[in-house]
Amino acid sequence: MKKSISLVFASVLTLAIAGCGNNSNNAGGNSAGSAGNKVAEAAAPADTTAKVTKIIVGTGTGFPQVCFIDENGKLTGFDVELLKEIDNKLPEYEFDFQTMDFSNLLLSLETKKIDLVAHVMEKNPEREQKYTFNKEAYAHWRNRIVVAKDNDSIQTLDDLKGKKVLVGATSAQAQILENYNKENADDINIVYQSGTANDTAAQITTGRVDATLAADFVIPIVDPQSQLKATGPELSSADILYVFRKDDADSQKLSDAIDGAIKELKTDGTLGKLSTEWLGADVTADSVQ
């Protein structure tokens, strides 16, 4: 995936030795007076030392099928493999992944420790106040309440009053509950889960919590034994995008380049294929835009 800068330099050095390289190489050819070298120089590309900008991508390791460490110790998943495909289409950039807890991703973006966030991030009004998003969505889904399969008493957020509801800190699902609590005297007991925890089904089925909120595709991932179910109407509908620093020219340039790559990957079918492979369905077709 990576377009290693060292490989670029090695390539330039090889061209220099062959007599068909950069400006200093052309000067050497002229002083030698070699016709063969002049022909090679004329045929050489105008710029063999194009700058490659390293981009630090912030992602997590605890979201199965999205961004996680596999049995071989490799970072992989839908977000990771999609960004590798995008990277392949953008020779001017080199993506370098940095993993961290989900709750630290946006702060790391603000403090310039990373250049973009890739963790199936939803665009919502709260996040738009502080960050910018690319325009071309790479997935789309709907959030609903998730409960134990035998629980028929919960259908709406009002039914969660006095209940414990498990969500990831700083997640879009947490924002839904926090917004509800602002208008309802903190009636829902929000339980914040670590970004690396993977015991959602166990917590619900054992009664430690009563419910969670989740995007539609997530349920089979967190509940492979089918002990849970989605219930009630959708709570929100969102495009999934990458997050960048706001009012930053370099970030905007990167965002625009990524938009172009995503469009290509949609057209050639790669995006839908990756979604089906990793998420079990093509969740890339719809859009709220």
Image (cartoon, rainbow, N blue to C red):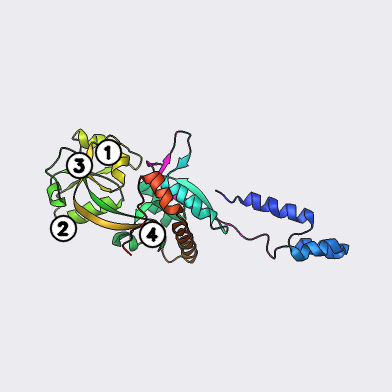
Q: Front-most of 82 and 160?
A: 82
Residue beneath disc 1:
200
| Amino acid tagged 3 | Val
Which-is-in-front pick, marks 2 and 3? 3
- Which numbered circle lies on residue 183? 2
Is residue 159 rendered to the left or right of residue 37? left
- Which numbered circle lies on residue 147? 3
Using the numbered discs, state the Cα–Cα distance from disc 2 to disc 4 in whole angstroms: 31 Å
Q: Which SS class for mark 4?
A: loop
Using the numbered discs, state the Cα–Cα distance from disc 2 to disc 1 in whole angstroms: 27 Å
Residue beneath disc 4:
137
Using the numbered discs, state the Cα–Cα distance from disc 2 to disc 3 in whole angstroms: 23 Å
| Amino acid tagged 1 | Thr
Magenta segment includes 46: yes
**The magenta stretch spans which residues?**
45-71
Depicted 247 relative to depicted 102: above or below? below
Q: Which SS class for mark 1?
A: helix
Comes first in the chain, label 3 or label 1: 3
Q: State if disc 3 and disc 2 touch (CB < 8 Å).
A: no
| Amino acid tagged 4 | Ala
